[in-house]
Image (cartoon, rainbow, N blue to C red):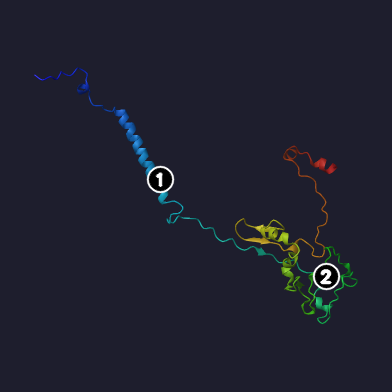
Amino acid sequence: MSGESPSEPGGPEDEEPYVAPPHQLAVWSVLGAAFLVAIALFSIRGSFAPHSSRPYPSRVLPAEPVPVLLAAPEVDEEYLPCKDCHGRRDLPNREVRELEIEHDEMDFSHGDLWCYSCHSRNPEQRQSLELANGSRVEFEDAWRLCTQCHGKKLADWRAGVHGKRTGHWWGEKEYRPCTACHDPHRPPFEPIEPRPAPRRPESIALGTGAAEEAGS
């Protein structure tokens, strides 16, 4: 008979192994599956990141056409051709003075400029304009002459902010040269008489407002 005493009821040998309930197994299964899906998504995103060489389809916009410069207004035929009065061999009188013959009716108001500030001083090129560096410019390209002094307006004019520009938002466009709106001899606009204010919708619906405008 050994000296070991019998084990007491309820000891370690009598405990049953732990078995997780079914709902807990389901929760762990869902969490594990979600974790695997997250890892898979991050892996896919990393493989197709912007630095990847995978070609992405992109919509290529067509090149925007270069705006078309409309023709400049016709020059007054009364003073053309210049050579009828200004001989090819006549040296120009560069003295700034008031004109008394032929062009005396012209109203000049263009800063300190006068004829030979813009018109060619070369007797052989009477029918053209002249830049400050002596380069010849045709009348239809007078904007090149204007923008020598009005450089701040050049970018606005090209962008359609200054002047009148028509056409499509993304497509063919047309814009007017400087002389289409400005008289080169007197560029400032004449004062414009204000027109009556527009009628409000309620006055149009009620048939009022016209009499008041006429009375004012």
Residue 91 horizontal side relative to residue 15, left or right: right
Query: Callout 1: few (<14), some (14-19), or many (20+) C-alpha neighbours within 10 Å?
Result: few
View extreme (bottom): residue: 89
Q: Quadrant of residue 138?
A: bottom right
Name the image quarter holding the C terminus: top right
**For residue 35, what is the image quadrant?**
top left
Q: Nearer the viewer, residue 20 or 210?
A: 20
Secondary structure under tag 1 reads: helix
> Looking at numbered disc 2 in the image, what kind of residue is underneath it?
Cys
Figure quadrant of residue 61? bottom right
Q: Residue at x 44, y 51 (%)?
A: 49
The quadrant the N terminus occupies is top left
Residue 180 is situated, as x and y percent measured from the top left of the image, at 75, 63
Amino acid carrying label 1: it is Phe
Q: Distance of mark 2 from mark 1, alpha carbons?
A: 74 Å
Indicate which disc, 2 or 1, sits on the residue closer to the N terminus: 1
Q: Residue at x 79, y 42 (%)?
A: 210
Q: Nearer the viewer, residue 124 or 205?
A: 124
Q: In terms of secondary structure, where does tag 2 sit?
A: helix
Nearest to the observer: residue 89 or residue 168: 89
Residue in the picture at 80% in, 79% down: 123
Q: Residue 130 at what x, y percent from top left?
A: 76, 72
Q: Is residue 181 above or below residue 16?
A: below
The location of residue 187, given as percent across then percent down, is 80, 61
**For the residue carrying disc 2, how many other residues have a C-alpha within 10 Å: few (<14), some (14-19), or many (20+)?**
some
* Dot in front, 2 or 1: 1
Relative to residue 6, is residue 107 drawn left or right?
right
**Which residue is pictured at 80% across the width and 69% down the height?**
117
Residue tagged 2: 115
Q: Farthest residue toward the front?
A: 3
**Which residue carries the number 1 mark?**
42
Looking at the image, residue 62 lies above or below residue 200: below
